[in-house]
Amino acid sequence: MKDLCLSAMNTAENLRVDYADIRIVQQRDQRVGMVDLSPKQLIDEDITGFGVRVLKNGAWGFASSSNINIDNVNASVNQALQIALASSSTKEGRGISLADEPPHKDCFKTPVKIDPFDIAINDKIQLLLEINKRILGIKYIVKAVSQIRVTKRHQFFASTEGSLIETDIWTVNAGYTAVSVKGGDSQNRSFQDYPLNAGWEHIQSMELLESAERIAEEAVMKIEADYPVEGRKDLVLDPSHLSLTIHESVGHPTELDRVLGYEANFAGRSFATTEKKGNFRYGSEIANFVADNTLPGGLATTGYDDEGVKCQRWDIIRDGILLNYSSTREVAPLIGEKRSKGSARADGYYNMPINRIPNLSLMPSPENVTPEDLIAGIEDGILIEGRGSFSIDQMRLNFQFGGDLFFEIKNGKKGKMLRDVIYQSITPEFWGGLDAVSGKEYWEPRGFRTCGKGEPMQIAQMTNGAPYARFRGVNVRRGRK
Amino acid sequence: MNKDWLREKIELLKHNKRVDEVALQIHTEKQNLTRFAENHIIQNVSKDTIDIHITAFSDKSSGVAGTQNSRDQSLLCTLKRAEEIALSSPKDPEFVEPLVSMEVKNIERYFIGANEITPKEKAEEINKIKKNAISKNMEVAGVYLNGEYSTGFANSLGHIAFHSYTKANFSLTAMLDDSSGYASEADEDIDKVDPVQVADIAFKKAILGKHPEELKPGKYQVILEPLAFAGFIPFLGWTMDRRAADEGYIYFSDRLGTKIASSVINLYSDPFNSDNTSLPFVPNDGLPLEKTHWIENGILKNLHTSRYWASKKSLKPIGVPTNVILEGGKKSLTEIIEGTDDALLVTRLWYIRFVNIKDFILTGMTRDGLYRVRNGKVEAAYKNMRFNHNPVELLNSVVELGKTKRVEGYTLIPSIRTEGFDLSSGTSF
């Protein structure tokens, strides 16, 4: 593979490209699913191929193939060059100019204690079977759906600037959902899936089996819970829920390509435009968001991004003020940045890297604040746990979220269970209402493996960590008629 | 890739298998996509891939392994991995045998032109549009895609299905300071995709949307353009499942055979519809697809039914559809607008998600054009709004249906004038 990479870069240099890089990807992806007591989706896939990116006359060309041999790789370099020449006819001015990045010769591997592919597929099936049996053993449960996914991505990256980077990234996750039906009504309750770049040891630590009956019982309890009283309420959001709100209302709006209009035709743009950098009040003074692609276990912790930029840590929002964005080598110079933030990711070998959300977290309080402390400061509010419905406008302002489990808060105490709670807000108003966060012992690195963006649609993964957090005066509605 | 290749490879697998049966599923793509934004090309990509999945069936268990390497040695290695999964798995209480050989009708969807347009020709087309946009002080973003694809299935019992097709797609968002417009066209035949015409529609919508005002939350009569209602179609597809209905946790539970929509509503699928052709079989088992009525004269007639659930409940299996057709009327969108006293015109919906699957409430935002229609004319533009609504109830409150238009390359949808669309909150653009 290394020789193929070097050969491709030699070919590119002989063709006098301005810049080229190649990624050869060998990905193994194993999925084990269980619906009730029926094994479903027992799939073990190899996804292997290469993608070549060429910059010529200020424009990109990209060609990819699953047919890996030296002739095809070299032909693809030439194809990417011809496409770049076609692209250059629409450029304005000098076209694309990449931010500097020193060449790297390095290897990076996810620290893994137990290789998840060493665990027999039948052991995975038996784990899910036992989970589903426990769920289905609870009265009024009609459906149990569980899954495990383990992935290893081995990638060689080389560029005409002299980088040669080999990475091995393992990612694992598992989760399940119980569906209850009683009296003509229905509810879901899920174990909150918790992906990390790690080995099987993460699955072992998740208490999947131990939680199954509780999750199923809660699915039934939700049917009999009360609806919320609609109106302005204070909310306490747990990390598994808040990670999604962060992802949608902070992660996506601070992707620089989106800010610059690259996603205008599909995923949308952003209200967090460049004149706001350094002065816009995004949230309250305790809203501190840090991007960290070196976070241990983080889903975007890959050593280097997919254009060979070393992973970094930086502030996105400090003391409530928008300070920076995630970026790639292409877009960083467009706002005067000398170096990319290393946020270029590609879905597979067959896609060109695009600007993706990094590991992005709301930072915890330096004080020893507990979730109970947050609840104690609320007269009339709701505690929301887990993820539910989610939707946000294409400028990332108006959003609506549901959740998975809800509890009334009255006079500083957690009270009865509620059902079908949704809340609506506008991003800066919502984060402006943040008035307390819990301490670091309650901070959790929750994450996503299914973040969609781009045309063609690309799927990426990243961690969005959060503590418990309290928000004042949020518009709460019921999500049923 | 063709049917002969499938026959040859399934024979190879059949002769080397150590399990009861084996199946081979393939999908190939040779695709070129040019993506532009900020008035220049930001991505120009070529993709040549083959996805191969081999399923091994053994004593009521099965396993699947995948590869992207079509050489014989790779296929045999992949077979071995699939067999290892099947042989190490417990018996599946919902196991269904592979299909025996049966006829799968095909339909021609391959148009050579869609594969011949070059990146240079596409760039020239985009340049023309860009110049036009600049002359209108607009920015444009969009994609121009073309390619050839094939999907095939074969198993060791002799069942075989193969389908190849071409695709072309052009979509564009035109942007002014305070408004935007979107249009798209997708077809197997690139001659039916006219980028200049698509851009022109988007330009007009953006101009019409200038100086948007705020709209009060409430329930409104709306005219949904075909693209807007098409946003609901995937959610209908995922939800209209017979087993989920029988198990009682979706909106369609206990509604089969009942009236759920206006009597004028006829919703069906038909891969052989000449205006909206689609894949004529289920990709993962080769089950042939035929014309199926989902809602007929407002009555829920069918839900898709897996082969396992069909055998358990003595029903006919009905595959998940590959296209959807909502029958329309005779009026053009313009004629519907001219006949409307007071309504909102909704051009596109965005970020649609379930709020509740039992009530089938979906939420999302309007996008790229929300207008007021008054006394037969489009009078003003509004800032975008969030909706929370059940799409079946929109079909139950239909005032009138317009002519159908093919949208997204797999739906045929009319303009729909309907009552009571619940718009619950607004945004600032």
Image (spheres, rainbow, N blue to C red):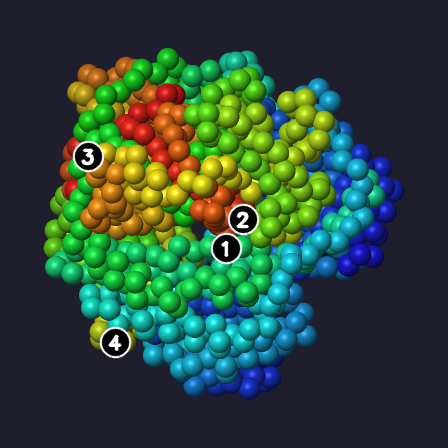
Of the pair A133 and A6, the residue shown nearer to us: A133
Q: Mark 3 lies on which chain?
A: A
Sequence-wise, the earlier of marks 3 and 1 is 1
- The residue at which mark 2 appears reads as A461
- The residue at which mark 4 appears reads as B312
Q: What numbered label is drawn on residue A195?
A: 1
Q: Which amino acid lies under the numbered mark 4 shown in the image of this protein? A: Lys
Helix, strand or loop at label 4? It is: helix
Quadrant placement of the N terminus of chain B: bottom right
When the figure is inspected, residue B142 is found, relative to residue A37, above or below; the finding is above
Q: Which amino acid lies under the numbered mark 1 shown in the image of this protein? A: Pro
Q: Which amino acid lies under the numbered mark 3 shown in the image of this protein? A: Glu
Helix, strand or loop at label 2? It is: strand
Are there few (<14), some (14-19), or many (20+) residues within 10 Å of tag 4? few
Distance from the alpha carbon under mark 2 to that under mark 1: 9 Å
Give residue A327's position: percent from left, percent from top: 62, 33
Q: Which of marks 4 and 1 is in front?
A: 1
Q: Are marks 2 and 4 in contact (CB under 8 Å)?
A: no
Q: Which chain carries label 4?
A: B
Left or right position of B304 against A24: left
